[in-house]
Image (cartoon, rainbow, N blue to C red):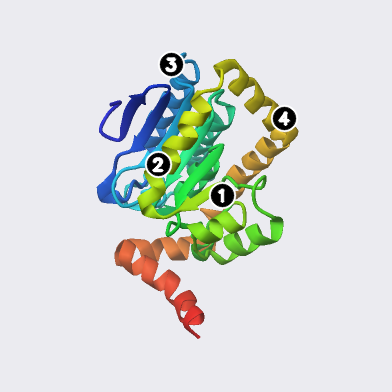
Amino acid sequence: MTGELLLYDDDSGFITLTLNRPEKLNAINPELEEELELRLKELGQSERAKVIIIRGAGRAFCAGADLGGDAERGTNQVQGWREAFLRSHRVYMSMLNSPKPIIAATHGYVIGMGFYLATAADMIISTDDCKFGVSEIRHAQSSTAWLPVWNVRRNQLMELLLTGDLIDGRRAEAIGLVNRAVPAELFESAIHRLARKLSLIDHLSLSMNKAAINMWYDVEKYVMASLYSVENNAALNVSEPHKIWDKIFKSEGLKGFLRRRDEPFRKLDEE
């Protein structure tokens, strides 16, 4: 165990990191991000760990950023938001650059920062009723902090991110977002079967081939695009439309904020 925010389990060749804020649906705060970055870097150098699994405790993988505990919320300074998004970016880069294959095991909600965290992994095993999406665009924030452009066709990604809709695990598998979406009763066995299979392969072969595959996908260009998104996110978070939504959040709380934001979309979907 690395601390109450992040649990650590060593199981014969593969390491499981569990986001441990179940009462908050594993919403990510700065402390959890820092623990994740530190542990990922340590495991990248570990001879014991061939494979890393990232999952969430309780009812969800991760429901996004901890809005109630967001230290940058309300700031009018681009730099404050830039620093927050760069902190997240370092976590995603630690996953991309890790010599270890990383599996995201997702269930429940995989939303916002949870979506980015899952799609920064090398492979995703999901329950078929899992909910994926990034709804930030609905309250004048960016939905492009980290994108699975290698996995999903442009038109599918455009619809998902420009509408803020959620899709289930079956749909996520159909568009290539996840490797496999399985019924809940098969979830654990699917995760461990893939992890065990990978752990049978020599460590050096795994790390060198992961690096080579990343090179085929032009990682340098991808990283440049992700840094552009950091600036994009920071600018949107001090924009006038976002300030309006921020006032609603402060006056009505999270539930009122989400109700006001999502009600027009819900009515449209019911037509």
Residue 244 screen position, x and y as percent: 46, 65
266, above or below 46, in the image: below
Q: For label 2, count other residues whose C-alpha is less than 10 Å away and answer few (under 14), some (14-19) or many (20+).
A: few
How busy is the neighbourhood of tag 3: few (under 14 within 10 Å), some, or many (20 plus)?
some
Circle nearer the N terminus (3, 2): 3
Q: SS class of the residue under badge 2? A: helix
Q: Nearer the viewer, mark 3 or mark 2?
A: 2
Residue at disc 3, secondary structure: loop
Q: Residue at x 55, y 49 (%)?
A: 178
The span from disc 3 to disc 2 (Cα, nearest Å) is 22 Å
Q: Do the CB atoms of the residues marked 1 and 4 lie less than 8 Å apart?
A: no
Tell me the CA gap for discs 4 and 3.
26 Å
**Circles 4 and 2 in contact, beta carbons < 8 Å:** no
| Image height of 26 relative to 250, above or below | above
Q: Residue furthest bottom?
A: 271
Q: Which residue is mark 1?
A: 233
* 247 to the left or right of 57: right
Q: Label 1, label 3: how many angstroms apart (C-alpha)?
A: 37 Å
Amino acid residing under circle 3: Arg
Can you give x and y, in whole percent of width and height, for residue 45 in the image? 49, 15
- The numbered mark at residue 118 is none
For disc 2, the marked residue is 189
Eye-nearest disc, 4 or 3 = 3
Q: Which residue is mark 4?
A: 215
Which residue position holds label 3? 48
User: Which residue appears at 58% of the width and 43% of the height?
Assistant: 230
Choose the circle earlier in sequence order: 1 or 4.
4
The answer to which of marks 4 and 3 sits earlier in the sequence is 3
The amino acid marked with disc number 1 is Asn
